[in-house]
Image: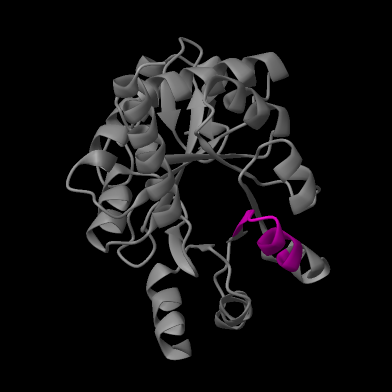
Amino acid sequence: MNTTKALRIALLLTITMAFQSCCVKENAIVAHRGAWKKNNLPENSIAALRHAIDLKLPGSEFDVWRTADDSLVINHDAHYNKLLIEETNYADLIKFKLSNGEKLPTLYEYIVEGKRNNKRTLLVCEIKPSEISKERGKKTALMAVEAIHKLKAERNTCYISFDYEMLKQIREVDSRASLQYLEGNKSPKEVKADRINGVDYHYSVFKKHPEWIKEAKEYKVILNAWTVNEAADMDWIIDHKFNYITTNEPELLEQRIKQKK
């Protein structure tokens, strides 16, 4: 290996490590489906994402499905306007507007907006397991990763899923991706062994397994909890110094964090 190539590799590794370090925070707020609740915006809308970015929140989460004609769209539930997304073409879905007049956003549109005037907010991409087949879900994940790379947004994005095998497949194609598991049935030590970066579990899982908090910190596994909306639960998570806290109430959580300082 020549000196120039070695220097380039070293520089790339330094940049990657610096970005990953800045993304692993303490008690950082992730807006669940964007910052939608206070202003009565549609969940997972472009407007909710924009508001999270404008609030300078550390993270904004969103959900990805694949339509029958292979469009990647942003919606929480498997159905949109009573239509099963995976069995419906995109043109038929966008006949129905969101409550603020937006059309159902594509992943492309969401990521483009997520990069615009955004220096702080991590895009937390939840890839939904397919209700048709495991293989379809895996293909959806690969398509999402490919789209995010094409938009040069991989450093702005982390991936989360309830499907463990999906996350492992993402790792095979992207050695640097930040991955967090949602199901709550594996210890931090187990996910670390599979090169998954974080445990993003319902807060009740950590109350049942408080030893996992210590284990995650020992193994340098990212700690994230969802969906933390009540002040008492927020205080418990804050006191245990999680890296991220996912919530529908980012404004309230910000107040609780300030009061704890």
- Is 142 drawn above or below residue 36 in the view shown? above
Display colour scheme: one colour
Which part of the image, by quadrant, shows the C terminus? bottom left
Residue 86, position as x, y percentages in the image: 56, 20
Q: Which residues are magenta?
A: 213-223
Residue 258, position as x, y percentages in the image: 40, 84
Residue 24, position as x, y percentages in the image: 48, 57
Return the residue nearer the eye: 90 or 155: 155
Asked if one can make out residue 95 in the rendered structure from this viewpoint, the answer is no
Which part of the image, by quadrant, shows the N terminus? top left
Residue 215 part of the magenta-drawn span? yes
Return the residue nearer the eye: 40 or 74: 74
Give the residue drawn at x 58%, y 15%: 139
Give the residue drawn at x 33%, y 36%: 11
Give the residue drawn at x 42%, y 77%: 252
- Is 29 drawn above or below residue 67 in the view shown? below
Give the residue drawn at x 60%, y 81%: 239
- Is 55 drawn above or below residue 150 in the view shown? below
Q: Report the residue that reaches farthest toward the top.
A: 69
Asked if one can make out residue 80 in the rendered structure from this viewpoint, the answer is yes
Residue 158 part of the magenta-drawn span? no
Residue 189, position as x, y percentages in the image: 78, 50
- Is 169 drawn above or below residue 28 in the view shown? above
Which image quadrant is residue 97 in? top left
